[in-house]
Amino acid sequence: MHKVIFGLALAAGAMAPALALADAREDVIAGITRCAALADDRQWLDCYYGAAQPMRAQLGLTPAPQAQIKLLQVQPQAQVASLPATVSRAVVRTGPPPPPRRSNIFDVMGGDDVVRNSPVKSYDVTRDGFVITLPDGQVWKQTDDDASKHPVSWRQPANSMRVTISQGALHTFNLVVNDENFHHKVTRIH
């Protein structure tokens, strides 16, 4: 019986630092969410540093300045629901998305869809093959080998076409138009 009690006490003692760490982390996260209501970047950053005070105290670090800690006390908890625009800042990309990632040596049999059921903005068919432009700016060209073996004679308007492009075997890409059962080998040129 003494061994069981000793084992439980030992387990509880081992878990206590983890529980304390979780509590400090939870307090920091709660403080950070309160900082989200601040629109001014400088105040937000000071509040963010102040929110880390529970973890600083647990680790024995110097305390945050009082001005930073006060910013946490000024913010009512109810303001957390409406986050200002500064919180959701993100880099805004312009132009087409980046080229699809190259598959690695283990992806010799193909991979995921790069483009799934996308409308076609425009296309051009010549004796050298076709070039398809998608609404997001991606431009895909039929490979020369595929163009010689499988020429197309599309006549429908571009807005009636949809394409799916997937990674093929050995670092190639396959394009399927609408619901056709046939795919064309393509490369991305833009």
Image (cartoon, rainbow, N blue to C red):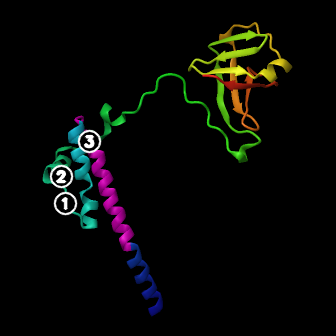
Q: Is residue 132 above or below residue 2?
A: above
- In the picture provided, is 106 more to the left or to the right than 118? right
Label 1 SS: loop
Find the magenta span and give its range.
16-40
The residue shown at (40%, 83%) is: 9
Marks 2 and 3: CB-CB under 8 Å? Answer: no
Q: Is tag 2's residue or tag 3's residue first in the polypeptide sequence? A: 2
Residue sitting nearer the eye, 114 or 119: 114
Query: Please, what is the three-letter code of the amino acid marked with disc 1?
Result: Pro
Query: Where in the figure is residue 111, as x and y percent of width and height?
Result: 70, 39
* Residue 165 lies in the magenta-colored region: no
Q: Is residue 62 above or below residue 108?
A: below
Query: Please, what is the three-letter code of the amino acid marked with disc 2?
Result: Ile
- Which of discs 3 and 1 lies nearer the camera? The answer is 1
Name the residue that disc number 3 marks.
78
Q: CA distance from mark 2 to mark 3?
A: 18 Å
Q: CA distance from mark 1 to mark 2?
A: 9 Å
Q: Give the numbered dot on residue 71.
A: none
The residue shown at (24%, 34%) is: 39
Residue sitting nearer the eye, 116 or 60: 60
Label 3 SS: helix
Q: CA distance from mark 3 to mark 1?
A: 27 Å
Query: Please, what is the three-letter code of the amino acid marked with disc 3?
Result: Ala
Name the residue that disc number 1 marks.
63
Among all residues in the image, which is located at the extreme left?
66
Marks 1 and 2: CB-CB under 8 Å? Answer: yes
Predominant secondary structure, magenta span: helix
Residue sitting nearer the eye, 26 or 151: 151
Name the residue that disc number 2 marks.
69
Q: Is tag 3's residue or tag 1's residue first in the polypeptide sequence? A: 1
The residue shown at (27%, 50%) is: 31
